Image: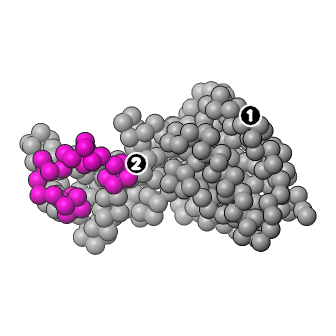
Amino acid sequence: MPRLYGGVDGGGSGSRFSILDENGEVFAESIGECTNQWLIGIDKVLENVEDMWKKAFESKSMQPVQLEGLGLALSGVEATHIKEEIVEKMQAKYSHVTKKTVPVNDSCGAVFTAFKEGGIVIIAGTGSNCQLVSPQLVQYGCGGWGHLIGDEGGAYSIAHRLVKAVFDDMDCLQECAHNTEVGRNLVWQYFGVEDQMDMLQFYYTKFEKSHIAGLTASMAKVAREQQDPLILSCFEWAGAQYARMLSGVIKRFKRETGKDFRGPEEFVDAVCVGKVFDSWDLMEQGFRRQFNQQSVVSKVRLYRCAASGALGAARLCDFSLHLDHKSFTQMFCEIDGM
């Protein structure tokens, strides 16, 4: 039996477990339930991790065996005391699963799947986040504080921006620079309402952040088909937010380390994760415009990664594990300001 290493790419809606052999090849995989400790607690998270470990070996018609190491790249794992609690509970109750546990934030899994020695990840899902992860697993963040404080550029914020523009224009509070008819009809249709008062239930008694965020997919469809200026402006605004986050996280890195962050050929490389990047064609203009207005960095390359962050999570246990990063990363945007 080869030496095996495990990795989990975990979040609130679901998780993926990958097992790699000592050559970095995928040995087995499984999918499982929520592993966000803020939502279900650490004990339930670890139960779900053990369940995925079992399922991965079951997919190979094998009895589960102890892993050399297990990297847990989970949303909601930032604080040191949370990481320590996870390690302690894994040692006490789940030592049969792994000899060593390395818990990190889910951003680390994406970074080390895409890049060999750390880098930047921009996350654009229901919310948003940007993290710079060093080879030593030190993280520097910009954004990612939830929809009440931030999450600009995420699907929720894009949808909310349209709803707010419609409401403000109807109230004569802030006249919209664009005609709001198409946007208003889309909002009413998506939520199945006929006026502003009917909308309030979705922000109070029936509030579901993911449901409001779902409007963004409909917005993208209308933006492409009808080229509606208001809806297009919402996506361009979102693109600008990601450029701001990218320059912000680089500035934070320099502020805290005194060093410039650069990659090969003086480029800053960032992997982009999340379904909102499926609408890059609608966001690109806003990203480029905002990027060209800042002076922190002049050269950037953005990548999408076809592989799960679980692979990078497994590497955290042993950095000698080789992944063919170039085979599952693809550059989709390059800006060379020099």
Task: List the residue tagged with mark 1.
Answer: 88
**What residue sits right under mark 2 in the picture?**
153
Residue 40 is left or right of residue 276, and the answer is right
Q: Quadrant of residue 3?
A: bottom right
* Label 2: how many Cα within 10 Å (few below 14, some 14–19, many 20+): many
Per the model, the C-alpha gap separating discs 1 and 2 is 37 Å
Point 25% across, 52% down: residue:
162
Percent coordinates x, y for residue 135 in the rendering: 74, 42
- Residue 307, relative to residue 233: is it above or below? below
Report the magenta residues as a range. Answer: 186-213
Element on which disc 1 rests? helix
**Residue reaching furthest to the right:** 1
For marks 1 and 2 on the same chain, the one whose residue lies earlier in the sequence: 1
Q: Position of residue 328 (x, y in %)?
A: 66, 66
Whether residue 215 is visible? yes
Label at residue 10: none
Percent x, y for residue 76? 56, 40
- Mark 1 nearby-residue class (10 Å; few <14, some 14–19, many ≥20): some
Q: Amino acid at mark 2?
A: Gly
